[in-house]
Image (cartoon, grey):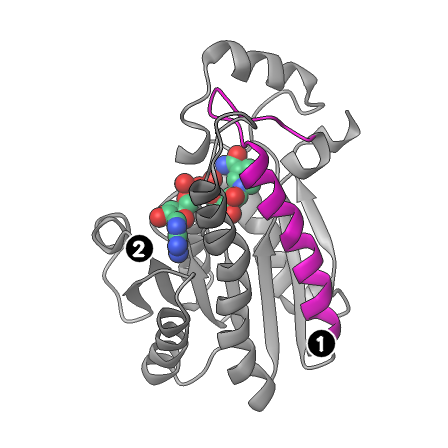
């Protein structure tokens, strides 16, 4: 594909899988995650890859990540924003501090990294943005047992609205879409009990959790020329679990 892509959440799970797939596809990647050591340990050293240890909820980190991408690779074609914070607290355990933290990383962070990328894309050759929501938005999951609780689910719902707003504001130069993963085999679901995993799996038409690569590929489609007329959409990569 040959694009220059800024990937957040690149130290783990879907973002890590996405970074590897993009490199295999001939892309140049700026890998962004607070866990810089982990990114460096998980990913190969090569000319097509640069690392940025940072936090998407900080305006200056987002601006710096974009400027380092441009300095290193000469441009920015796409942002794939997978990075997020998780909260499993139920309604009666959640407090304002955790709620505000989740909103600031997941919602404000999605906005800030999109804004930083879009400023460059709108002023240059255009581009595309992929945000990440969650199938949990459809179920109203309640938290506990490693499942997303009200803070996480609300933050992922807000990202659907943000996606629509950005898609309209940035069209036609920049397309903005979202991937909605179902349960995928990553650290984020590591707190789930075996019983919960088995009961959830039974409800999915595909009968299993997704692999990180299966989610990442939906996002890679969205930044490709094959998705040139798609903007403001949410693609569900969830094994059919929104049919429940
Ligand atoms: N795994 C699932 O079942 C599932 C389901 C629905 C949605 N999602 C979404 O998919 C995306 C990827 O999640 P994953 O499953 O790969 O989880 P993961 O925990 O494996 O990876 C999340 C990554 O985000 C990074 N991150 C955390 N805070 C950040 C910040 N402030 N700035 C930048 N990066 C930050 C983490 O360091 C980590 O590397 C997330 O947006 C998540 O909400 C995952």
The stretch in magenta equals 140-168
Circle 1 is placed at which residue position? 169
Q: Is residue 26 left or right of residue 1?
A: left
Q: Residues within 10 Å of mark 1 (few under 14, many from 20)?
A: few
Q: From the top left corner, tell me how far across and down residue 237 is, in percent.
A: 65, 41
Q: Is residue 100 left or right of residue 68?
A: right
Circle 2 is placed at which residue position? 34
User: Which structural element holds mark 2?
Assistant: loop
Quadrant (top left/top right/bottom left/bottom right) for the C terminus: top right
Q: From the top left corner, tell me how far across and down residue 67 is, in percent.
A: 37, 81
Identify the mark nearer the N-term, 2 or 1. Answer: 2
Instruction: Please say whether residue 47 is one of the residues in the magenta stretch.
Output: no
Q: Picture quarter containing residue 34?
A: bottom left
- Residue 240 seen from this side: no
Asked if disc 2 is less than 8 Å from ligand 1, the answer is: yes
Q: Which residue is at a point 63% across and 58% down the rendered structure image?
A: 221
Q: Is residue 146 left or right of residue 142?
A: left
User: Whole-Å distance between the Cαs marked 2 and 1?
Assistant: 29 Å
- Residue 81 seen from this side: yes
User: Which structural element holds mark 1?
Assistant: helix
């Amino acid at each position: 594909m040959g694009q220059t892509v800024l990937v957040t959440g690149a130290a783990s799970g879907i973002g890590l899988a996405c970074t590897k797939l993009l490199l295999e596809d001939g892309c140049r990647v700026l890998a962004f995650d607070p866990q810089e050591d982990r990114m460096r340990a998980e990913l190969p050293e090569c000319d097509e890859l640069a690392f940025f240890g940072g936090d998407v909820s900080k305006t200056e980190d987002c601006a710096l990540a974009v400027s380092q991408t441009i300095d290193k690779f000469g441009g920015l074609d796409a942002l794939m924003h997978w990075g997020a914070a998780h909260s499993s607290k139920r309604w009666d355990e959640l407090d304002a501090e955790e709620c505000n933290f989740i909103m600031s990383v997941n919602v404000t962070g999605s906005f800030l990294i999109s804004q930083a990328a879009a400023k460059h894309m709108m002023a240059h050759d255009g581009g595309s943005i992929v945000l990440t929501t969650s199938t949990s938005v459809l179920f109203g999951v309640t938290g506990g047992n490693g499942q997303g609780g009200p803070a996480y689910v609300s933050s992922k719902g807000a990202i659907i609205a943000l996606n629509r707003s950005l898609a309209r504001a940035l069209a036609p130069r920049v397309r903005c879409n979202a991937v909605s993963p179902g349960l995928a085999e990553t650290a984020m679901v590591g707190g789930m009990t075996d019983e919960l995993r088995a009961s959830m799996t039974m409800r999915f038409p595909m009968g299993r959790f997704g692999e990180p690569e299966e989610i990442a590929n939906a996002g890679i489609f969205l930044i490709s020329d094959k998705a040139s007329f798609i903007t403001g959409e949410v693609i569900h990569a969830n094994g059919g679990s929104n049919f429940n």
